[in-house]
Image: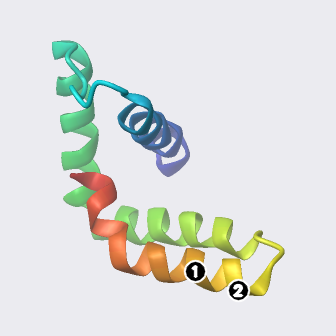
Amino acid sequence: MLLRLLPLVFVFLYVQATDSGNNGITCSFCKAGLASMTATIQSNPDLMDQLGDTISQGCDQVPNQLQRRACRMTLDDNFPLFLQ
């Protein structure tokens, strides 16, 4: 289940990051789908742990030690924001 949700979470983050007008997502179906995914993830502590582990493993792939540490610190500080 996590593997199916993870790409959608990253698509959501990409859409939010590239929205130059800062208008957010305007498609009602998109909003409903993302809200449903977010609720599903947040209501399942095991799934939240898996998502955190998967993302933190991405930090482990950063070759530079200083950047790897910054990646982990950013993740620790901002993980709850990924699902807002």
- Residue position for label 2: 66
Residues marked 1 and 2 touching at CB (< 8 Å)? yes
Cα separation between marks 1 and 2: 6 Å
- Residue position for label 1: 70
Q: Residues within 10 Å of mark 1 (few under 14, many from 20)?
A: some
44 over 12 or under it: above or below: below
**Residue 56 location in percent, x, y?**
57, 72
Which kind of residue does numbered mark 1 sit on?
A: Ala
Picture mark count = 2
Residue at 37% across, 27% down = 20
Q: Is residue 17 left or right of residue 82?
A: right
Residue at 49% across, 83% down = 73
- SS label for mark 2: helix
In this picture the colour scheme is rainbow
**Residue 80 location in percent, x, y?**
27, 66
- SS label for mark 1: helix
Residue at 76% across, 86% down = 65
Which kind of residue does numbered mark 2 sit on?
A: Leu
59 over 15 or under it: above or below: below
